[in-house]
Image (cartoon, rainbow, N blue to C red):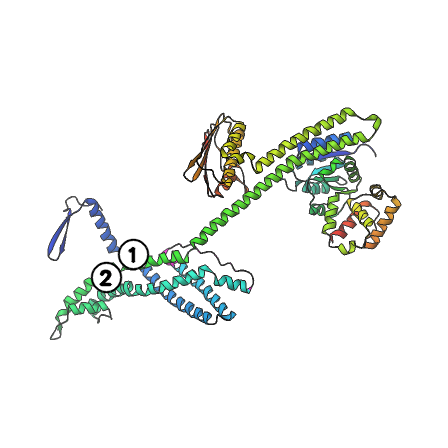
Amino acid sequence: MVGALRIAIAEDSAILRDGLVQLLVDRGFVITGAVGDPAALRSSVSQNPPDVAVIDIRMPPTFTDEGLRLALDLRSRHEGLGILLFSQYIETRYAADLLADDAAGIGYLLKDRVADVSDFVEALERVAVGGTALDPEVVTQLLGATRRIDSLSVLTMREREVLGLMAEGRSNAAIANALVVSEGAVEKHVANIFAKLDLPVSEKDHRRVLAVLRFLES
Amino acid sequence: MTPDPGEDSSVKVRIGGRELSMALTEEQKLRVKALTNTVLHEPFTARPWKELAFFLLGSGLAGVGLAFVAFTMGAGVVLAITVVGLAILALSLRSARGIGALQRSLARNMLGEEVEDPEPFLGRPGFFGWLGSRLRDRVAWRSVAYLALKVPWSILGVFVAFSLWWDAFVLLTLPLFGHGGGGSPVWGLVSAFFPAHDFNGFNSGGFTRDLAGFVLGAIFFFAAPWVMRGFVNVDRQMIRSLLGPDPMATRVRSLEQARTQTVDASAATLRRIERDLHDGTQAQLVALAMRLGMAKEKLEVDPDHVDLERIRELIDAAHRGAKEAIAELRDIARGIHPPALDIGLEGALATLAARSAVPTELSVTMQARPTPAIEAIAYFCVAELLANVAQHAQASRASVFCTQQGTWLRLVVRDDGTGGAQLTTVGSSSSGLAGLADRVHAVDGQLYLVSPPGGPTVVTVDLPLAT
């Protein structure tokens, strides 16, 4: 990787904010700003642009979806800025809003995921290079809410696992790693899934995520 | 008018040839004058004529209405074995409701009698739901009862009050037109007492008779407005009690409001607890897991270069976080239900007073124990009020008095701070004192705030011992 990744953080809980800064500095990231509310992040991002903004969804003043609106706003102003939304709850609708037109450089994770530092850092790096990182919980909710149960039943258990990991935004290599199989085997599964579900084959990982999500939501 | 001081201060009344003399005080004289004034002026004001018009119009309407409702109801009952009969009955009740509304607006426009509209009709979904609701519509049945009472009352009123007017009219106009008495029964009596004697075509008895009739007519003329008013006032009372909102329904409505407040208050409480958990314990636990995760990674990476110092720091921070999370969780649990309440209000309040940041004097004199719900509200009131004192009042002392007054519990929380507290409501959700007031109102209690700028602030909360 060329140089250290630059991260800005908006999180209103001081304990978590400090913990995150500690964790990321420890891992060699550069923190461009660590703030507690949307307005402060806006000015921090324009003054000292980061690669990724890590944003808590519930922030002052109303503690509802400030973070989500901030994320959409930053996306439209700063092209190529990665966004990692970070929350104690997963709302499937927030994911849908966030991924409305593009899944490139978008992440949506439960705060719990920071406990597995490597996974969290990996997700952050994925978002930084224009990939996607969706929480397994988002994928589970989407799989649970989908009306395409019949279509999913044509998949084998393994293929469903691969579908889930694919929806989280993982690359073939990462999926192979997670399932402890060869990358070739993953590629074969992915090809099968796309054929069985009649999905358009895409090269980029984040296009793949969108295709899968569209399929699950429709 | 001021009485002339030279005037004889007695009134002479001649009854049966004897003169009665009554000494009257100035005040009584004034009153008699005012009364005479009123009686003499009354027929020339608008009010009696409006009342007369209302009575005649309302009676006519009630008569037609009752006839219609009675006929349709009769038809409905006869056909009640079929759905059609029930539907006719329902429509009949629907029209009774309408007639009631008409009577109400008549009273409003002609008498200025402001009767609140009764509760609107709420039909259940579907035809049979509608039918059932119509047949059970209390407002409609009360309208029917009104019509059934109003019609006989109107008949009586027309006989008594209206015929007074009619007689007054006939008797007063008799000397002018010399008509035959126009069928007035009173004229018949007058004629019997003063029979006419014809002397060569000269009606000698006519003058005395006409004079007696005229005097009687005048008396009737001045008395009629008051008799009419009596009838109208009874009608007003019937309209108020039968066409206005049902007292039962009014009570139900106020209970519904209280219930809404309670539901809102408990929703707000749940939201607060969620917020506390989210911002406090959950965040603490995430940070804790994060630190342990970092420590774990540090142990895993390179067995030869384990940074023990850093790991110790991380575990130390995690340990502190865990203890803080436990303390926060305990506070939140206490916010849901204070365990101290299990031993009684006095003990719980003692804990609160002892924990208060401002030195607080406590006095509790209770003979009976309130219900748990009231104890909880009393506890949270004191907790919130003492927290307010600590945060805003800049007080050096505070006191809490909890006394029993009959079936009421009275809490008085006082501080010597800067005052200026207000029962403000922020947006749609009430905050602080206003939130407390809502909570207190939900159990029919009251919260009073006295807080002049410069202090002191006294908040008094009255709660029923049992809900």
Residue found farthest to the bottom: B200
Residue density around tag 2, few if under 14, some if 14–19, many if 20 or more, within 10 Å: many
Front-lying residue, A151 or B233: A151
Q: Are marks 2 and 1 in contact (CB under 8 Å)?
A: no
Q: Chain of mark 2?
A: B
Q: Nearer the viewer, residue A139 or B454?
A: A139
Please give left or right for residue B93 compared with residue B426 in the image. left
Residue at 74 percent across and 50 percent down: it is A143
Q: Position of residue B145 (x, y in %)?
A: 40, 62
Q: Which residue is mark 2?
A: B220
Above or below, comparing residue B282 to residue A196 in the picture: above
Q: How many marks?
A: 2
Q: Give the SS element for disc 2.
A: helix
User: Percent x, y for residue A69?
Assistant: 67, 42
What residue is shown at x 21% (from left), y 68% (from top)? B187
Residue A28: image location, x then y, percent: 79, 30
Task: State left or right for residue B34 relative to residue B56.
Answer: left
In the rendered structure, which amino acid carries the disc numbered 2?
Answer: Phe
Picture layout, residue A82 above or below residue B307: below
- Does residue B58 appear in this view? no
Residues behind callouts 2 and 1 on a single chain = yes
Coordinates of residue B378 in the picture (x, y in percent): 49, 37
Q: Nearer the viewer, residue B112 or B66?
A: B66
Give B414 or A54, whichever is nearer the viewer. Answer: B414
Judged by its main secondary structure, the magenta piece is loop
Q: Nearer the viewer, mark 2 or mark 1?
A: 2
Query: Which mark identifies residue B45?
Result: 1
Q: Which residues are magenta?
A: B107-126
Q: Which kind of residue does numbered mark 1 sit on? A: Thr
